[in-house]
Image (cartoon, helix red, strand yellow):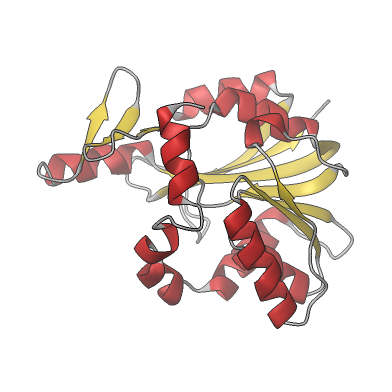
């Protein structure tokens, strides 16, 4: 296991700071707004078999399940999955299938008609390998929504905040945490397009935020919806 993956395993584990660091965000996040966006963007139906990729503590998974959708969740952190199951039980809903797995090596029981990788954290991940892995777990004709930070927003932020705790490696397209040394890759759109093509995924829609605005260099997000073609 690489040093980055070891750090991430600790960070998202029982003794890690993930939930503490994101406490303010999680309290203010509008989960119903997120769900409304996902339902519209992926045209989710109650008959769909849905996968929440990197589901964490199951906020979106459990909310969809509570609304009657058939949804499973997968994450590499067993600690967060335990919280997801506990929260599902507390909400008195049918507990979704929660799988502890490496996104680069997914081999799940079912094939999915819809999947989403929402607000994705790309640290320590082989992205092309992960996309191939996800594609193998999608049905032909199935759709994937992938949501990540906009590469250009990162650059603009660092230009305006030179004393921030991050720096950007323009040769490798990686954001580097000065304190931990953790690197997060931020591919440009052409790279995503090539990786999707290699995984038999065709881009159907590209947007720049959760209001379905066109993607541009000023967009806060890069959101892509792709369809499995073979």
22 in relation to 223, above or below: below
Residue drawn at x 39%, y 69% as measured from the top left: 23
Residue drawn at x 59%, y 50% as measured from the top left: 77
- Looking at the image, the residue that sits furthest to the left is 163
Quarter of the image where one finds residue 88: bottom right
Indicate the position of residue 191 as horizontal and vertical percent values.
50, 23
Indicate the position of residue 188 as horizontal and vertical percent values.
43, 28
The C terminus sits in image quarter: top right
Residue drawn at x 64%, y 30% as measured from the top left: 104
Residue 42 located left or right of residue 45? left
Residue 68 located left or right of residue 182? right
The answer to whether one can see residue 121 in this image is no
Quarter of the image where one finds residue 153: top left
The answer to whether one can see residue 100 in this image is yes
Indicate the position of residue 110 as horizontal and vertical percent values.
88, 44
Indicate the position of residue 53 as horizontal and vertical percent values.
65, 48
């Amino acid at each position: 296991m690489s040093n980055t993956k070891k750090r991430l395993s600790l960070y998202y584990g029982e003794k890690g700071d993930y939930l503490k660091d994101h406490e303010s965000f999680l309290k203010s996040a509008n989960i119903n707004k997120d769900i409304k966006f996902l339902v519209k963007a992926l045209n989710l139906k109650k008959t769909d078999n849905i996968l929440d990729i990197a589901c964490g503590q199951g906020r979106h998974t459990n909310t969809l399940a509570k609304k009657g959708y058939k949804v499973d969740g997968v994450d590499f952190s067993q600690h967060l999955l335990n919280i997801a199951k506990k929260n599902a039980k507390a909400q008195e809903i049918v507990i979704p299938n929660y799988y502890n797995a490496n996104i680069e090596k997914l081999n799940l029981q079912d094939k999915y008609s819809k999947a989403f990788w929402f607000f994705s954290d790309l640290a320590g991940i082989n992205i092309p390998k992960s996309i191939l892995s996800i594609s193998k777990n999608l049905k032909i004709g199935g759709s994937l929504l992938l949501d990540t930070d906009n590469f250009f927003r990162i650059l603009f932020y660092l230009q305006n905040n030179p004393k921030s705790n991050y720096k950007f490696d323009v040769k490798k397209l990686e954001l580097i945490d000065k304190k931990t040394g953790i690197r997060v890759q931020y591919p440009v759109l052409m790279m995503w397009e090539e990786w999707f093509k290699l995984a038999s995924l065709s881009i159907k829609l590209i947007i720049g935020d959760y209001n379905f605005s066109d993607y541009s260099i000023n967009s806060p997000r890069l959101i892509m919806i792709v369809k499995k073609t073979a």
